[in-house]
Amino acid sequence: MPIARPAATSYLLAAMSFGRSNKTWHEIVDDRSLEMDRVIAEKLRANPKLVQVALINIERWLANPDYSESGRQAALEWKGIIENSSVEALVTLLESSSEEARRLRQSSPFCGILTPDERQAIFRKYEALRDRACLASR
């Protein structure tokens, strides 16, 4: 009887299928962020109230007078997206590999939804891929 794998394991196995010269470290980090967002999306589906964690993060960031202007703009963009989207639309965005989703992941307010163990497991998996990354940027 086959053993069921958690979604995060499936994402990792897909990510590990590339060879040494296929992706830069930056692209691998993008893949890692996408995996984290996909696990967060699963949690949001199971408990939509977790969206409040992102809104609390945004409010905390915006209340900080030392927060950079670019960080402030990103937080406001996320706030607008969250306040004007259904949970299903947010989940779709988090699971997306589009350029827009990749850009938004650079300033994700969804930190704190993954447990430290979940986050660390994903980081360890992708750190193991560091030696496979190609050295040259594209």
Image (tube, grey):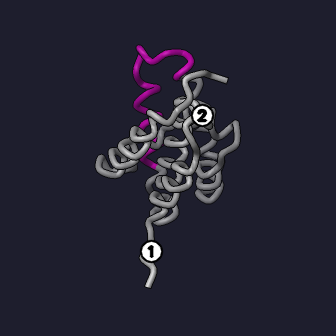
Residue 75 is at least partly visible in this image: no
**Residue 137 at x, y percent in the picture:** 62, 22
Give the structural element (helix, strand or loop) at label 2: loop
Q: Residues within 10 Å of mark 1 (few under 14, many from 20)?
A: few
Split into 4 quadrants, where in the image is the N terminus? bottom left
**Residue at mark 1:** 4
Give the structural element (helix, strand or loop) at label 1: loop
In this view, 51 is above or below 138: below
Considering every residue shown, the one lying at the far left of the view is: 117
**Residue 127 at x, y percent in the picture:** 40, 38
Q: Where is residue 134, by image quadrant?
A: top right
Q: Where is residue 61, by image quadrant?
A: top left
Q: Is residue 23 left or right of residue 16?
A: right
Residue 82 versus residue 120: which sits nearer the camera? 120
Please tell me whether the stretch drawn in magenta is mainly helix, strand or loop: helix
**Residue 47 at x, y percent in the picture:** 45, 63
Q: Amino acid at mark 2?
A: Ser
Q: Residue at 33% of width from left, 45% of height from top?
A: 120
**Residue at mark 2:** 21
Q: Which residues are magenta?
A: 52-71
Residue 54 is at least partly visible in this image: yes
